[in-house]
Amino acid sequence: MTKNDNKIGREEVYNKILTIIPTLSEVQMRNLLNILEKWQQSKFDEKRKYHRKQTFVWTECSADTRFFADFIQNLSVSGLFIETQFPFFVGEKLSMTFSLPGADDSIKITGKIVRIDSNGIGVQFDELLPDI
């Protein structure tokens, strides 16, 4: 960006971006997507009320009549992120069952999808988990 680019309006910035994207190779577009998703995630992290812990825990889930199993990538008392390629939509309700390392009992909890990106889904629990 040039020094004068800070003075153009939102619509002009948007139009410039739209003219640049078609000129990018697939690799460049994927790199740009990764950068934007990391930026979006960092902004989302700043808004979090509860700290997320990185993890790699298997979970079984159901949404309406669909069932799937995938890995939880991070977890807090208020939600989690599941790495998945299954198609979902924001607002969709999920039931999840998983076990934390070293725990005797499984956790069964419900929540709703609040975020979707190319790596998976962010789920906010309907009720807080006990301290994890």
Image: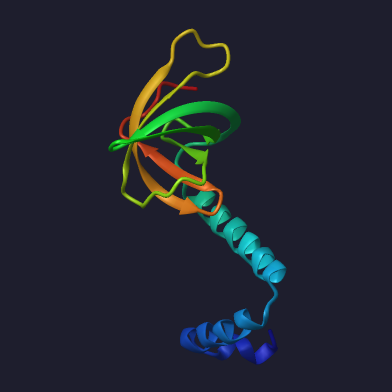
Relative height, residue 60 to residue 35 (above, below): above
Expressed as whole percent of the image width and height from the top left, the position of residue 114 reads: 38, 48
Residue at 36% across / 52% down in the picture?
89
Residue at 60% across / 29% down in the picture?
56
**Number of marks drawn:** 0
Camera-nearest residue between 43 and 17: 17
Quadrant in which residue 110 is drawn: top left
Q: Is residue 45 left or right of residue 107?
A: right
Expressed as whole percent of the image width and height from the top left, the position of residue 45 reads: 53, 48
Residue at 70% across / 88% down in the picture?
2
Relative height, residue 105 to residue 84 (above, below): above
Q: Which of the colour schemes (rainbow, by chain, secondary structure, one colour) is used?
A: rainbow
Expressed as whole percent of the image width and height from the top left, the position of residue 78 reads: 41, 34
* Residue extending furthest toward the left: 64
Relative height, residue 38 to residue 96 (above, below): below
Quadrant in which residue 124 is drawn: top left
* Residue extending furthest toward the top: 104
Expressed as whole percent of the image width and height from the top left, the position of residue 31 reads: 69, 64
Camera-nearest residue between 62 and 111: 62
Say which quadrant the N terminus sits in: bottom right
Q: Is residue 95 left or right of residue 49?
A: left
Relative height, residue 59 to residue 79 (above, below): above
Q: Is residue 28 left or right of residue 41?
A: right
Residue at 58% across / 54% down in the picture?
42
